Amino acid sequence: MVRSMKREKSCIVFVLLTTLGFLILTSSFLSAQVTIPREDTVYVIGVQWGPPTTWNLFSPSLAYGGDEVLYIPLFMYSWMKDAWLPLIGEKFEWVSPDVMRIYIRPEAKWSDGEPITAYDVEYTFKVTVEVGYGPGIGCQDYVEYIKAIDDKTLEAKIKDPPRNYFSFIGCVLGYRPMPKHVVEPLYEELGVKIKEWGNDDPEKQVVSGPYKLFYSAEDRIILERLDDWWGKDVFGLPAPKYLAHIIYKDNPSANLAFEKGEADYAGTFIPEVWKLFDKNIGTWYKDKPYYVGEGNIFLYLNHLKPMFKNVAVRKAIAYAIPYTEMIEKAYFGYSIQASLSMVNDLSPAYREWINRDLCVKYWGNPECRLPTDLERAKEILDNAGIIDRDGDGIRELPDGTKLSDITISVPYGWTDWMMMCEMIAENLRKIGIEVRTEFPDFSVWWNRIVEGTFDMIIGWDGGPGFDHPWNSYRWVLDPRIVAPAGNWERYNNTDIIPLIDEAASTTDPAKRKELYSEIQEMVYKEVPSVALFYGAHWYAYNTKYWVGWPTEDNPWWFPVAPWSIDSLPLLFGIAKAGETPKPPEWLKPMEEGGLLIPTSYIWEGLAKATSS
């Protein structure tokens, strides 16, 4: 669920019919039929839930998880490899401690044949800042400028203050441009209404990646490989000619298709996945936990709502959550309870950032894992004067605000999280907080996040990265971030800003740990939202039609869900059943003749620029 996390699920019935080796997709909404060869198509589940709305990166309504293969970044970061893959960008260098220069590949072109230039990146950044949404929204707080030096040379300067190397590096290297020659006339005509542009006409859509929109309807999205893609001479072409994202009404329907071999690549929650291993299905690990734990999953409490502005209410909710029961019963043991420090302590590299003394001081154990304790939750509310004044079983705040008519929601079809919502709601009712569950379509749920109109939701953070746990603190707590890019709960404590900024600017690990400790103590005192568990990164595959998927035993790439930008390289290394897969040589580190640039190279270059 993540980056990450970006797990996107929920809506619409489909029918699959197979004839003469071809798959005919029929829609109850449209009379048109689309025919694509089954043997050339990777069918994907777990990317799109609900009818597609837009392919416009400037739109807050963008909720399509497959856009990463349409619009690719300058460089792609792999959190398991801790390395960067140069895509549109060919190389980079520090000109000074303030300025990074990026060189765009000379062969890089848009799908209409126009060259991809530094001016595309510069203009995309400009429009994003001016309309308030788009690629890299929020980066303007840390990047003073992104400007073209010439057609293929780009420079970006870090904003100081704050000198935030984490955000600067992530923003600049990971930037995804849109085509200036397409966007500029639209922006001049529409202004901020460019957010309403659909970018959904396959004939007019101009992309940078190896796939382009081929067809979309209420129940499916089909992407077609561009056989004349500019990256062909550098990377080759991905193996599948088509990517088909079928929109299922819920997880069980999607998983059934996957089990039958009607889908090949899954980014969904699959109950008891180990029972499917004799049906051509596999995961990263052959044994428990089967999936790799990734980002934190939170119960987000909307601070715009009066009841959640009260710290005692938030703390009581934290004690009332049935953590163990949720993970075992709803999640099938695919994870463990998260540390309230927001640090993913499954990784030794991350674990060192937790202040154990603070964990013991506030939560009574060195891991910062909160036990479920309904009596303690009631005691917190009683001591804060949040009691049941009229005898109806529902508590009121001291000002009379009733703790009722509260919803906890996730999109319909996310069966594991739906069950968790029911469990949480049941426990909260036991302590006098009236909560009901609600499971809308994904688009409705997502819009409520964007608009800040939800009560409680289960959601993710930014996932692991070269900057963890800083990235989680920024995503969840930074009041400068606008949803859905982060700060979903609308936490508004400006005292955290200098801590977040200094942690990203210091090169002293001891100082950074000290700053993280201050952030952790603030989190423990205020409990802005509640870290629940580490989200399993849903990665499963079916070898009926496609083979060569990366695994723990064959780690040529890493376990990546199809809704992640990191899924793109995976498509270059799989092969049709019966053929021999050949993982790309360019996915090896530089020192082994590949293209992957280690993160250490960035810091070494910065140190050299600083000392010169």
Image: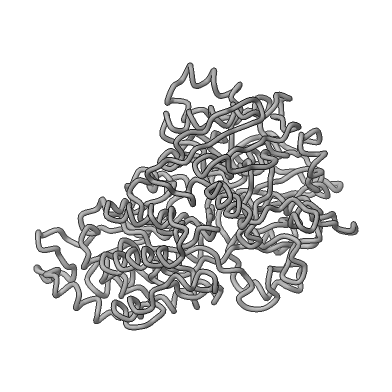
Q: Residue at x 44, y 54 (%)?
A: 504
Q: Position of residue 603 (x, y in %)?
A: 57, 54
Q: Position of residue 595 (x, y in %)?
A: 74, 50
Q: Residue at x 76, y 57 (%)?
A: 591
In this picture, is 495 found above or below 140? below
Q: Position of residue 463 (x, y in %)?
A: 51, 59
Q: Position of residue 433 (x, y in %)?
A: 24, 67
Q: Visible in this render: residue 437?
A: yes
Q: Residue at x 47, y 41 (%)?
A: 158
Q: Is residue 284 left or right of residue 147?
A: right
Residue in the foreground of this view, choosing between 444 and 343:
343
Residue in the foreground of this view, choosing between 263 and 611:
611
Q: Visible in this render: residue 563?
A: no
Query: What colour scheme does the image use?
Result: one colour
Q: Is residue 569 left or right of residue 514?
A: right
Rendered image quadrant of residue 371: bottom left
Rendered image quadrant of residue 392: bottom left
- Marker count (numbered): 0
Q: Is residue 63 left or right of residue 318?
A: right
Q: Residue at x 28, y 58 (%)?
A: 406
In this picture, is 356 found above or below 499? below
Residue in the foreground of this view, choosing between 105 and 223:
105
Q: Is residue 21 left or right of residue 600?
A: right
